[in-house]
Image: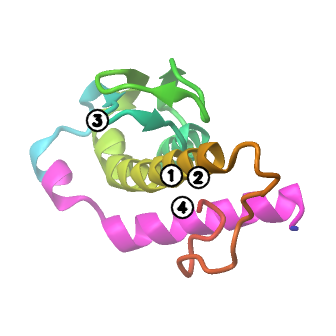
Amino acid sequence: MISEAQFQHELDLIITNAIREDVGDGDHSSLACIPESATGKAKLLVKDDGILAGVEFARMVFQYVDPGLQMEVFIADGTPVKYGDVAFHVSGSSQSILKAERLVLNAMQRMSAIATKTKVFVALLEGTGTKILDTRKTTPGIRAIE
């Protein structure tokens, strides 16, 4: 088990590396088409029933990209969700929102899928005395969010 400080460091590394890989020297479409002064608002719309995961990670990504982004959370991590639910709104610089959105969506889809499938397995094993454990067989570089 790693310390909370080490866990936070791992999350910071994931965010730094993912933004560097995804955006590189800039989101050229956003930079070319959206004025730097433009502000906007986005929402995370749930596309399937399941267990929501990654909201706090999303908050970290948005803050990393632009500390001026504001996030209003409606559904917390670990909460059952249904198609059409809105998990959160984020507002601020349109360029910043677009810079962060791909990492946020990809991470939350993966994390929510893992949480949802884990809940199914836990329910199947209920009453058997069997415990679900995590594994070291994770995706290199993103173990902390898996």
Of the residues under marks 2 and 4, which one precedes in the sequence? 4
Identify the residue shown where x is 54% and y is 61%: 15
Q: Which residue is mark 4?
A: 15
- Lower sequence index among marks 1 and 4: 4
Q: Which mark is residue 80?
A: none
- Of 70 and 14, nearer the camera is 14
Q: In the image, what residue occupies the spot 41% across and 27% down?
A: 90
The secondary structure type at the circle numbered 1 is helix
Q: Secondary structure at mark 2?
A: helix
Vertical placement of 40 versus 34: above or below? above
Mark 1–mark 3 distance (CA, rounded to whole Å): 16 Å
Left or right of 109? Residue 77 is right
Residue 120 percent across, percent down from the top left: 54, 46
Locate the N terminus and report the quarter of the image it occupies: bottom right
Residues 29 and 21: in front is: 21
Seen as rendered, the residue at the extreme left is 33
Labels 1, 2: front one? 2
Instruction: Report the residue marked by disc 2.
Output: 121
In the rendered structure, which amino acid carries the disc numbered 3?
Lys
